[in-house]
Image: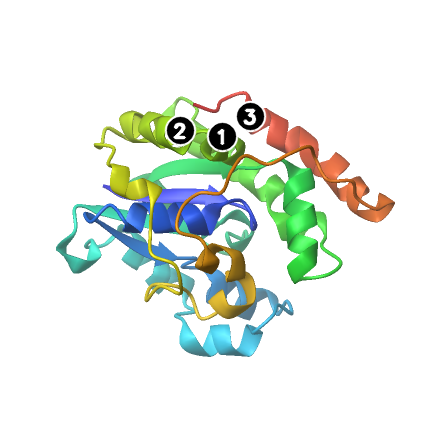
Amino acid sequence: MKIAMWSGPRNLSTAMMYAFAARGDCAVWDEPFYAAYLRETGIDHPMRDQIVEAHEDDPALIAAACIGEIPQEQSLFYQKHMTLHMIPQFDRQFMRSLTNVFLIRHPARVVASYAKKREGPTLADIGFVQQAELFAQAADWLGEPPLVIDSADIRANPRAALSRLCAALTIPFTDNMLHWPAGPKPFDGVWAPHWYGAVHRSTGFEDPEGSLPELPPEYQAIVDEALPFYEKLTAHKI
């Protein structure tokens, strides 16, 4: 099975990748389209030049690898995708050959976390509009809503949330998914030193989050724009 997990940044996405990698039967791929997105858009991100130099940036080749042979002779292939990377110029037909799952997080938490790593985020940077668009497209292909899981539910009870996800995917749950060794991983993207500090210090999912963060007006405005897209997917979460 090839699982494409679609989220915006700062959505618990790296921890989820680590959880699937810890299973023992699953190959993982960290943000396959990141370099292609940067090359195509010219957008300025931290470590931009290093990312484009170190990773494949041809979207056709990336898409072919996403649906090709599973690496390392594993039975599962978990792909951590950022919704904002799937720009209109990239052909999305490869998604039809994947099991598409959508990982969501409240936009106030996303904006607060993102702004600590890259100042001045915009609505486009955090991926909510793109996520809703991809969700609708996947639903159209399937004839029913694809799977949605909320990071808040994972942090509230990782065992229960991941058990539900695995059941929905018709794969066995394993306790291995709840823990991983601290530190960088060989499958991390080259961008990990900038973005992955907290998850590198972790050995499992963090405790539930408290109340929503208070944000300055310019960031709250982004949250308000993103909230309807988040709520649309929340209605379908497992």
Q: Secondary structure at mark 2?
A: helix
Counting from the top left corner in percent of width and height, residue 90 is at: 47, 55
Read off the residue under disc 2.
161
Residue 192's x, y, as percent?
48, 66
What residue does disc 1 label?
156
Badge 3 amino acid: Thr
Residue drawn at point x = 41 percent, y = 43 percent: 5
Residue sitting nearer the eye, 187 or 73 = 187
Give the farthest residue toward the left.
Answer: 73
Give the mark nearest the N terminus, 3 or 2: 2
Q: As shown in the figure, which amino acid type bears the numbered disc 1?
A: Ala
Mark 3–mark 2 distance (CA, rounded to whole Å): 14 Å
Q: Quadrant of the C terminus?
A: top left
What SS does tag 1 mark? helix
Single out the mark in the foreground, 2 or 1: 1
- Give coordinates of residue 152: x percent, y percent: 53, 32
Instruction: Find the distance from the CA under tag 2 to the CA under tag 1.
Output: 8 Å
The answer to whether marks 1 and 3 mark residues whose Cβ atoms lie closer than 8 Å is no
Q: Secondary structure at mark 3?
A: helix
Query: What residue does disc 3 label?
Result: 234
Residue appearing at x 32%, y 28% in the figure: 163
Question: Residue 19 placed where, x, y %?
Answer: 34, 46
- Asked if residue 169 can be seen in this view, the reply is yes
Mark 2 touches mark 1? (CB < 8 Å): yes
